[in-house]
């Protein structure tokens, strides 16, 4: 029988009431195939029509193309019949639960080929480079074929990854945050264009505001490469327009509640605020709650597919969201981990950086995205 990881959320907020596991400690997944197991996984994620999603049907909006659920293992033949991986990411959050669903799909497909994959999927309740360092040092004492890392702080974690590679460990990075340039990690699977995502969202905001006004930036976690890069893209874009001004830049540590509190304070200090740029999945929700309560006209742009954020997008409270293809990140991470475990390096079999897409969606896309991901429009 399929043993599912003990992570929280899996996209559907309502699922929190029925999950019986906790997500702040170690989790493991042991592969088992079968149509019923795959259906259960999709149902838990709120993906209610997996067969249709995999059929390649065209959509009238950009929402359908934002997330690709149609994946098959490539032709590579693994050298072993069992692999054991260790993955650690920044913080327990539904975003990484969506990545885990892609991993599970790849895991089931490998089992269909007679190959069992087990893995630990671990994260703290709050992003912490110190916590991640501790977890990686503990993983180094385990029997893992590959260690995968969603980097919490590039400056702190990258030297540790270099040291692990020098000691013979097979290390890759994945998800939304790579190590710093020059790190010895073998490969990265995820978003390679966070700076561009921040710039694209900010450009959309500037156009909406007719290139004039006061804006604030909610970054996320201090030192997290993806959050910092998006904020940098936002700042550089604002700098192009003389009538645009950044009046506040705050770190919400990927917390909805803290993002709400910070937005309330920003609005109090700047009642004429025109816009907010949100650089992670949590802060668009916190910002939208505060904007709604204050009856502010500030325009929000932000990241990803949180259900509440999509509802705010549908209602016009959020102007646009940059949705990353988490499912593909997870699927490709597991495939490349197998190849790395077999001793392969970047080249013909896989690239050093596997780039996954981000799609900017608007109000007209929100209903379809809610239906695709949550069975709710």
Image (spheres, rainbow, N blue to C red):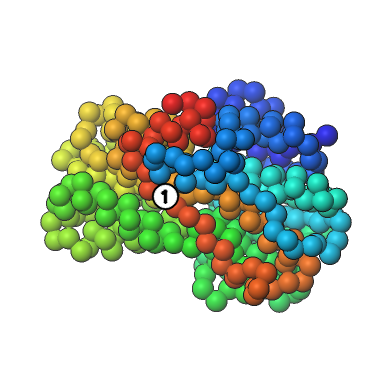
For the point 63% across and 30% down, the residue is: 44
The total of numbered circles placed on residues is 1
Horizontal and vertical percent position of residue 66: 47, 46
Q: Is residue 208 above or below residue 138?
A: above
**Residue position for label 1:** 359
Residue drawn 69% across the image and 73% down it: 345
Q: Residue furthest top?
A: 17
Q: Is residue 146 visible?
A: no
Which of these two is toward me, 180 or 321? 321
Q: Residue at x 24, y 44 (%)?
A: 275
- Report the side of 319 relative to 44 (left or right): left
Q: Is residue 286 placed above or below 119 in the rendered structure?
A: above
Mark 1, secondary structure of its residue: strand
Residue at x 77%, y 71% (from the top left corner): 343
Figure quadrant of residue 76: bottom right
Q: Quadrant of residue 15?
A: top right
Image quarter where the N terminus lies is: top right
Residue 67 versus residue 322: which sits nearer the camera? 67
Quadrant of the image for the C terminus? top left
**Badge 1 density bin: few <14, some 14–19, many ≥20, Cα 10 Å:** some
The picture places residue 201, in percent across and down from the top left corner, at 32, 52
Instruction: State left or right for residue 83 relative to residue 198.
Output: right
Q: Which of 77 and 257 lies nearest the eye of the viewer? A: 77
Horizontal side, residue 270 vs residue 75: left or right: left
- Residue 373 screen position, x and y as percent: 52, 34
Residue 32 x, y percent position in the rendering? 80, 41
Image quadrant assignment for residue 281: top left
């Amino acid at each position: 029988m399929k043993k599912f990881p003990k992570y929280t959320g899996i996209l559907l907020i309502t699922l929190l009431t029925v999950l019986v596991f906790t997500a702040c400690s170690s989790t493991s997944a042991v592969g088992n195939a079968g149509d019923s197991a795959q259906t259960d996984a999709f149902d838990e994620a709120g993906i209610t029509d997996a067969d249709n999603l995999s059929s390649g049907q065209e959509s009238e909006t950009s929402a359908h193309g934002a997330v690709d659920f149609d994946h098959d293992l490539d032709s590579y033949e693994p050298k072993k019949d069992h692999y054991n991986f260790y993955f650690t990411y920044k913080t327990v959050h539904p975003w990484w639960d969506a990545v885990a669903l892609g991993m599970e799909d790849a895991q089931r497909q490998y089992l269909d080929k007679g190959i069992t994959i087990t893995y630990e999927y671990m994260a703290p309740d709050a992003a912490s480079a110190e916590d991640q360092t501790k977890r990686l040092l503990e993983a180094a004492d385990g029997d893992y074929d590959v260690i995968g890392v969603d980097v919490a702080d590039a400056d702190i974690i990258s030297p540790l990854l270099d040291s692990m590679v020098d000691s013979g460990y097979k290390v890759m990075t994945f998800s939304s945050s790579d190590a710093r340039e020059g790190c010895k990690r073998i490969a990265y699977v995820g978003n390679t264009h966070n700076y561009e995502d921040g710039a694209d969202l900010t450009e959309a905001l500037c156009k909406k505001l007719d290139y004039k006004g006061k804006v604030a930036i909610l970054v996320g976690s201090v030192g997290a490469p993806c959050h910092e890069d998006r904020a940098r893209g936002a700042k550089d874009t604002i700098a192009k327009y003389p009538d645009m001004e950044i009046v506040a830049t705050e770190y919400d540590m990927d917390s909805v509640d803290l993002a709400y509190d910070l937005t309330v304070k920003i609005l109090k200090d700047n009642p004429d605020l025109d816009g907010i740029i949100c650089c992670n999945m949590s802060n668009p929700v916190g910002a939208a709650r505060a904007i709604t309560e204050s009856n502010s006209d500030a325009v929000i742009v932000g990241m990803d597919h949180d259900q509440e954020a999509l509802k705010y997008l549908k209602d016009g409270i959020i102007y646009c969201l940059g949705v990353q293809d988490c499912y593909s990140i997870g699927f490709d991470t597991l495939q490349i981990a197998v190849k790395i475990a077999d001793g392969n390096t970047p080249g013909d079999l896989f690239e050093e950086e596997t780039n996954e897409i981000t799609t900017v969606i608007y109000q007209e896309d929100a209903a379809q995205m809610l239906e695709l991901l949550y069975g709710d429009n």
